[in-house]
Image: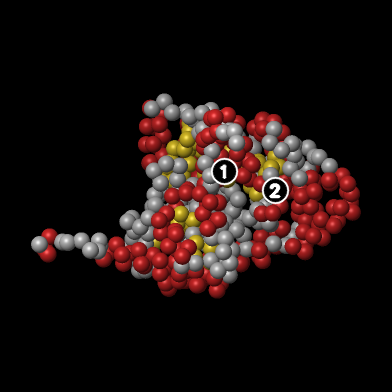
Amino acid sequence: MQDFSKYLSANANNMKKSVIRELLKLTNQPDIISFAGGLPAPETFPVEELREASDRVFRKYGDKILQYGTTEGDNDLKAQLVAYESAQGIKLGPENLLITSASQQALDMLPKLFLDPGDYVIAGRPTYVGAIQAIQSYQGNVLGIPFSTADDGFDMVELEKRYERAISAKKRIKYIYVIPDFQNPSGICWSLEKRKALLEFAYREGLFIVEDAPYREIRFMGEPVPSIYQLDQQMQNRGIVINLKTFSKILAPGTRIGWIIAREDLIQKMVIAKQAMDLCTSVLTQKMIAEFMATGKLKDIVARTCGIYRNKRNFMLEMFEKYMPKRFDLAWTKPEGGLFLWLSLPRYIDTDKMFYKAVEKKVAYVVGSAFYFDEPETNSMRINFSYSSFEQIEEGTKRLANVISEEIEAHEAGPRGQTSPEDI
């Protein structure tokens, strides 16, 4: 068979497999309790309502919904989204919207448009692995910024320091990528002060901000904070924020529908990029969601989802308190929304290696190292609380706590079978 590798482009050779997707292959067993996937709870899906909406659009539009559509997106869905976002304080028109095949398409589109080989994107340490993959696939790099100890956004002092070093080293930085609401993987939420500070930094340095907001509506505790897009409109209104949204977490991931909010000239450039990707997003699915949104039921679905996730999050935190080893160097975030929390272990524990021991104990997580572009930290993990049942959360937490305890005990026991100086 002919070797094709020598024919691959530099971009193709720079693509990396998703660590999460590869690890999930090992957890595809019915008896494994998995906290690994970023899966919404199936009980939140409005199956009957979406079926009814689908029936209505077939009756209304017939074969038209089986035809190609415009790249920009279905007008009915865009009208519904304008009303939806306007109710949340965002000023926009249909010209500020592009419908995408979920938000991952947008994440691939942005480095395609903005990055030349060797260019940099500022992002958190850790950050969403799908964004890292997209940046890598276009030969881009990530300038990683740690989060503050208050878990309220970037450490702004470190942002200034690392940015200045990068500029001094002649590195080209094109945009800032953040997930300010219940970040994947950590679950933290940026404070109002940090959002404003990031905007001021971007204004000063002339950078765009990509605000990835798949979990924004999934807030089940605390008070809402304005989006960075909204704050830009309230502050200097420079149009430097590109906001990414999706129905995957607020309705159903199988719809594969997302949307981009940005100023008109940026949207037009993204339309051209999307034309080369898929011509258009599914007309059928767009019409179905528009029909569903017209019923006004999305708000109720989101509220019900938030209630389910609040209960699961609270129960998981209770189980962590109950079963996890009590140590100063073992801690976890306590998110006010979203689907994840971040578990940090003693520095000597390598969760990459421990993963296989956890699978043997029939429990799974996502290794923390997957969320770093370079110099990964290996003593952490992402835990999903949205998908598992309450029984699975308790049993899975017990299993995971046992694996962690065994790692701690093995370390504290020290090397076995070695002669100590005192024995000589």
Position in image of residue 85 (x %, y %): 68, 48
Q: Which kind of residue does numbered mark 1 sit on? A: Glu
State how many labels appear: 2
- In whole angstroms, how far apart are the C-alphas of marks 2 and 1? 17 Å
The residue at the point 79 percent across, 60 percent down is 51
- Looking at the image, is 34 positioned above or below residue 57? below
Residue closest to the far left: 424
Q: Nearer the viewer, mark 2 or mark 1?
A: 2
Q: Position of residue 148 (x, y in %)?
A: 40, 49
Residue at point 45%, 63% (across, down): 358
Q: Which residue is drawn at 58% across and 29% down?
A: 7
Q: Nearer the viewer, residue 405 or 31?
A: 31
Q: Residue at x 69, y 54 (%)?
A: 254
Point out residue 149 in the picture as x, y percentages from the top left corner: 38, 52
Q: Tell me whether the residue at label 2 lies in contact with that at label 1, contact meaning CB atoms closer than 8 angstroms.
A: no
Q: Where is residue 138 in the image (x, y as percent from the top left)?
A: 55, 33
- Residue 316 visible at all: no
Q: Which of 99 and 229 is in front in this view?
A: 99
In the rendered image, which residue does mark 1 sit on?
211
Q: What element carries label 1?
A: strand
Q: Which residue type carries mark 2?
A: Ile
Q: Mark 2 points at which residue?
A: 257
Circle 1: is it few (<14), some (14-19), or many (20+) Cα within 10 Å?
A: many
Depth order, front residue of 164/344: 344
Q: What element carries label 2?
A: loop
Q: Which of marks 2 and 1 is nearer the N terminus?
A: 1
Q: How crowded is mark 2: few (under 14 residues within 10 Å), some or many (20 or more)?
A: many
Left or right position of 394 against 110:
left
- In the figure, residue 280 lies in which quadrant? top right
Q: Quadrant of the C terminus?
A: bottom left
